[in-house]
Amino acid sequence: MKLTGRDWLMAAGGMALIGLLALGSEKGRGKNVPLDERHKPLYDAMKTGRTQAATELVCATCHGQSSIPLPDKHPPKEQCLICHLFRAST
């Protein structure tokens, strides 16, 4: 079977579509949770098997209105671990 110009055009269009979808897949993804001393309680909570909802309550203790406020354009959700991922801890 010989490939025609139309076949190559369809293949290029499909690759372009896959590329656009891949670029858009990370849009809206937050930064990873830092692996530092301040965030150690979060990593410890995940290691001990606490649920995601229980772990997110720890986030709210520091990232409330008083101590470390969230950026102005941050979504008003308390579902931190949907956008902010944990690094593989050692």
Image (tube, rainbow, N blue to C red):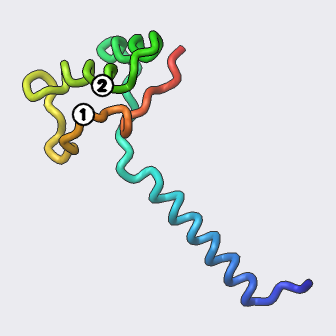
Q: Earlier in the sequence, mark 1 or mark 2?
A: 2
Relative image position of residue 33 (x, y in whole percent): 37, 27
Q: CA distance from mark 1 to mark 2?
A: 7 Å
Name the residue beneath numbered marker 2: 56
- Which image quarter: residue 77? top left
Q: Residues within 10 Å of mark 2 (few under 14, many from 20)?
A: some
Residue 1: x %, y % from top left: 92, 84
Residue at position x 35%, y 17% in the image: 42
Q: Residue at x 21, y 24 (%)?
A: 60
- Residue that mark 1 sits on: 78
Q: Is 33 in front, or is 64?
A: 64
Query: Residue 5, labelled with which disc?
Result: none
Tell whether label 2 touches label 1 (CB within 8 Å): yes
- The image shows residue 52, relative to residue 74, as above or below, that is above
Quarter in which the C terminus is drawn? top right
Depth check, front residue: 67 or 49: 49
Under circle 2, the secondary element is helix
SS label for mark 1: loop
Residue 49 position within the rendered picture, expressed as x and y whole percent measured from the top left: 45, 14
Q: Residue at x 70, y 76 (%)?
A: 11
Label 1 Cα crowd, 10 Å radius (few <14 / some 14-19 / many 20+): few
* Amino acid carrying mark 2 in the image: Glu
Vertically, is 14 above or below 58? below
Residue in the foreground of this view, choosing between 53 and 29: 53
Instruction: State the image coordinates of residue 79 (x, y, percent, origin top left).
Output: 30, 35
- Please state if 29 lies on the left or on the right of 88 as rendered: left
